[in-house]
Amino acid sequence: MSRGPLIGAVIAGVAGAAWAQWAAGGATGRASVAIRVLGIMAGVVVVLGAARLLPASEADGDRSMFRTWHYRLTVVTEVVAIAAGAAVLGTVAHGQYVIVWVALVVGAHFLVFGRFFRPVFHQLGAAVVVAAASGAAVGIAGAGPGAVELVTGLISAASMLVAGGAVVRAAVSDRG
């Protein structure tokens, strides 16, 4: 396996743990603690699993997606969209939907990656868009901000951690 997917798995592990921390903000008591601890533990497993395989992986050279203008433009657009959307939502007193906006933008960025790099990104993008839609639906249905955070964050965390774990598992299988 080349280095690119393993680097992506490291990113997914960190992002999955971060999404879990955000989700935990919507829970209380032991549930919040459990989500935080399990999110960090799962993220560490994915990150360490990928990191230990990196030294034996093949160099990507100039074909690395991280070196392309498509990648850079997509990530810059993502960051600007997240900041702008969060600012607007805060200004119009709908800050509870910032997590939904972030998930929607992150999901869209993976859909773009699927178009330009690897079709497997479509699955991750769709899962994170579903997280955004689920969080929005919970909020529109009348649940409080905590429920919006919990639903969006948990689905996003699980999506990232499963995707990163799948890459690690595939890399282990490739090594025999």
Image (cartoon, rainbow, N blue to C red):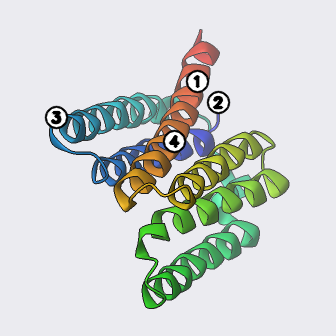
Question: Mark 4 = which residue?
Answer: 155
Question: Mark 3 = which residue?
Answer: 30
Q: Which numbered disc, 3 or 4, marks the residue closer to the eye?
A: 3
Foreground pick, 128 / 175:
128
Question: Mark 1 = which residue?
Answer: 171
Identify which residue is drawn at 46% across, 77% down. 94
* Numbered disc 1: secondary structure: helix
Q: Residue 128 carries which label?
A: none
Hey, which residue is sitting farthest top in the picture? 176
> Badge 1: few (under 14), some or many (20 or more) residues near its Cα, within 10 Å?
many
The mark nearer the N terminus, 2 or 3, is: 2
Residue 54, image x, y percentages: 48, 36
Q: Which numbered disc, 1 or 3, marks the residue closer to the eye?
A: 3
Identify which residue is drawn at 51% across, 46% down. 156
Residue kind at label 1, given as amino acid type? Ala
Q: Distance between the residues labelled 3 and 4?
A: 19 Å
> Badge 2: few (under 14), some or many (20 or more) residues near its Cα, within 10 Å?
many
Residue 82, image x, y percentages: 54, 76
As drawn, 110 above or below 67: above
Left or right, 75 with reference to 138: right
